[in-house]
Amino acid sequence: MKFSRSSVKAFLIFPMHVMGVIPAFLVWCSRPGGVLESFPYSFSNIRSLAGMLLVTVGAGLCWKTVSLFTEYGEGTPAPFDPPRKLVIQGPYIHMRNPMMVAVCLVLSGEALLFASALLGLWFLLFFGLCLVLIPLWEEPDLENRFGESYREYKQKVPRWPA
């Protein structure tokens, strides 16, 4: 995996906010004395280990997908700087949305790690938005930008892992 400046910048722009900044803020607010303390968090060995595993796998997959966008797609995951080339390699060979799968792995892992209902709700909200926005906004945009090559890719590769 490459650690180019553009990959690091792209990773920090979108995925890190969704997977890091917002969850950290929610955990901070749910601490004793926090504004959301009625949503406490806790740790346990087995559950926390499973959560850490999901976070690690998801973060690695997310880094890989962001790197592919910057290195081969000549863009970023950010809507204001989308890839200029269609990326069909690495995990994109097996599913069309590995970045969203990666973020969902991290978010569900964080909810498990902290045993936090609030982080679980954040994961469900994010996942629900993915289920709505990907077919209604992202896929039509990709068809407009990449035309027939995206339509062929869409026919061959499932949206989500099978």
Image (tube, helix red, strand yellow):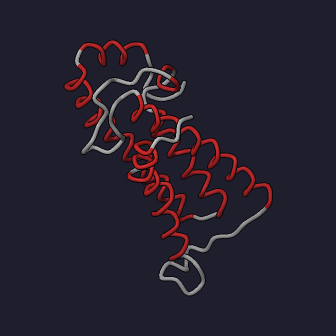
Q: Position of residue 57 (x, y in %)?
A: 63, 41
Q: Position of residue 60 (x, y in %)?
A: 59, 41
Q: Please state if 159 lies on the left or on the right of 44 as rendered.
A: left
Q: Position of residue 76 (x, y in %)?
A: 35, 40
Q: In this view of the protein, which residue sits in the foreground, 73 or 128?
A: 73
Query: Measured along the vertical axis of the image, is residue 94 above or below residue 31?
Result: above
Residue sitting at the far bottom:
33
Q: Residue at x 36, y 19 (%)?
A: 154
Q: Residue at x 31, y 41 (%)?
A: 133
Residue sitting at the far left:
144
Quadrant holding the N terminus: top right
Q: Position of residue 25 (x, y in %)?
A: 48, 70
Q: Residue at x 45, y 40 (%)?
A: 100
Q: In this view of the protein, which residue sits in the foreground, 40 or 15?
A: 15
Q: Please state if 28 lies on the left or on the right of 156 as rendered.
A: right
Query: Measured along the vertical axis of the image, is residue 102 above or below residue 106?
Result: above
Quadrant in the rendering for residue 153? top left
Q: Please state if 28 lies on the left or on the right of 96 as rendered.
A: right
Quadrant holding the C terminus: top right
Query: Measured along the vertical axis of the image, is residue 31 above or below residue 125?
Result: below
Q: Residue at x 72, y 57 (%)?
A: 48
Residue sitting at the far right:
45
Query: Measured along the vertical axis of the image, is residue 79 above or below residue 157?
Result: below
Numbered-mark total: 0
